[in-house]
């Protein structure tokens, strides 16, 4: 018997069977991660970094789910930050990085080869260094040899579900350096928001009242085009795409306004749109069949978006609807950049796991990544 996606999500036994690795339980640990790593970071001697004073820039080296921590830091610091915050995903550091720049290396396992390479290069260049990862790892050893602070993270799952464990130490150090205003009370407010969203999205909440299950069902069978309406929600869009890839093994197109209006919007008139060139029409299903995988526009709306971007967002949704492209809109919620980002990311994390389960895909394994690593050794 073929199960409908909603049946897989609303039958708790089927839902649990579809998530044998317990990824949903790991997603639910987000608030605990914030609180735990705030304490761990406070107990870590950060003197070698703080004594150097405010750096010229902060460069966060990391890959995949670990690298997302740097994107979160940059988004929360925002364009008004006192210095550049750069998220870097490569073996080599940019040529301009030197002794005046703080390098933060982030690797959940502490074994990520690209991050280890960039960290070793930072040490050779004499950069102040902070490392975040698993205790006893290769990254921990590099930090020890460089006499640099190391913040241990106890992995409770794949790096993609450990975002807050990896990002909180970065936000604490940014606050201490005066780069951003993220006090302990701000971290606790974000943890409370993560708990609130987790309650709304809990597995025993049925799809008609569960925003994450609703979103997953909307996405199933479509090609999502996900746009943020600000730099902050643009980071959430990037997170959304990555989580769809890993949790649901599902493709996505991600972008941010206004840039997406200068390129990606043209796909509204392409083969994945139900009908081209605007103007609602009645199709003859035999002569003009709808695409087997239609576009779906997903807009991540930020209350702090530029007024002209708000107008672009509205018109983009209108243009999509005129072409038969369904539109989902999610609003960031909260008083601070961290709260707004956390509220979106937690909903996204739940929805992408639910999508995998809904379409019969185990959200846990990432076999092709493991196979790739084995082949490049």
Image (cartoon, helix red, strand yellow):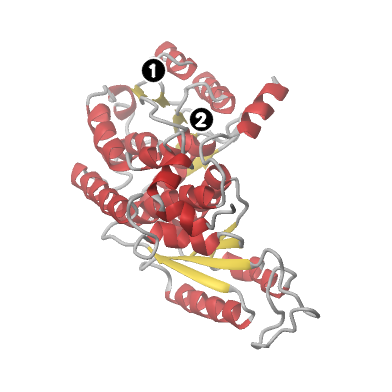
Most distant residue in the right direction: 287
> Which quadrant of the structure image shows residue 143?
top left
| Mark count | 2
Look at the numbered discs 2 and 1 and tell me whether their residues touch, using CB distance below 8 Å. no
Element type at marker 1?
loop
Give percent across and percent down for residue 55. Answer: 39, 36
Q: Is residue 104 left or right of residue 171?
A: right
Mark 1 burial class by Cα count in 10 Å: few <14, some 14-19, many 20+: some
Q: Is residue 181 above or below residue 149?
A: below
Camera-side residue: 26 or 49?
26
Most distant residue in the left direction: 185
Q: Which residue is mark 1?
A: 135
Q: Which residue is mark 2?
A: 98
Camera-side residue: 352 or 34?
352
> Which quadrant of the structure image shows residue 132?
top left
> Which quadrant of the structure image shows residue 371?
top right
């Amino acid at each position: 018997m073929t199960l409908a996606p909603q049946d897989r999500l609303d039958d708790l036994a089927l839902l649990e069977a579809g998530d044998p690795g317990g990824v949903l339980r790991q997603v639910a640990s987000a608030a605990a991660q914030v609180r735990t790593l705030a304490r761990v970071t406070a107990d870590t001697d950060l003197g070698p970094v703080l004594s150097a004073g405010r750096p010229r820039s902060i460069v966060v080296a990391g890959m995949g789910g670990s690298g997302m921590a740097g994107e979160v830091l940059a988004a929360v610091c925002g364009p008004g930050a006192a210095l550049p915050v750069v998220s870097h995903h490569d073996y080599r550091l940019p040529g301009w990085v030197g002794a005046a720049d703080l390098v933060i290396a982030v690797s959940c396992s502490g074994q990520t080869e690209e991050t280890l390479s960039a960290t070793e290069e930072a040490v050779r260049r004499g950069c102040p260094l902070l490392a975040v990862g698993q205790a006893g790892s290769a990254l921990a050893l590099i930090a020890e040899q460089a006499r640099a602070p190391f913040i241990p993270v106890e992995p409770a799952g794949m790096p993609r579900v450990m975002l807050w464990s990896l990002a909180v130490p970065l936000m604490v150090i940014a606050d201490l350096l005066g780069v951003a205003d993220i006090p302990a009370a701000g971290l606790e407010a974000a943890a409370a928001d993560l708990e609130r969203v987790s309650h709304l999205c809990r597995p025993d909440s049925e799809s008609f009242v569960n925003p994450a299950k609703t979103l997953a069902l909307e996405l199933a069978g479509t090609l999502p085009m996900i746009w943020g309406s600000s730099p902050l929600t643009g980071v959430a869009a990037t997170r959304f795409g990555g989580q769809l890839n890993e949790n649901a093994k599902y493709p996505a197109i991600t972008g941010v306004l206004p840039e997406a209006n200068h390129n990606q919007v043209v796909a509204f008139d392409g083969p994945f749109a139900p009908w081209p060139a605007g103007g609602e029409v009645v199709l003859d299903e035999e002569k003009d069949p709808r695409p087997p995988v239609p576009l779906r526009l997903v807009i991540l709306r930020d209350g702090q978006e530029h007024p002209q971007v708000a107008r672009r967002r509205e018109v983009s949704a209108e243009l999509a609807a005129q072409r038969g492209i369904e539109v989902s809109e999610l609003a960031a919620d909260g008083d601070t950049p961290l709260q707004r980002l956390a509220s979106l990311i937690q909903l996204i994390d739940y929805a992408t796991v639910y999508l995998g389960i809904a379409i019969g895909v185990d959200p846990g394994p990432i076999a092709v990544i493991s196979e790739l690593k084995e082949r490049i050794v």
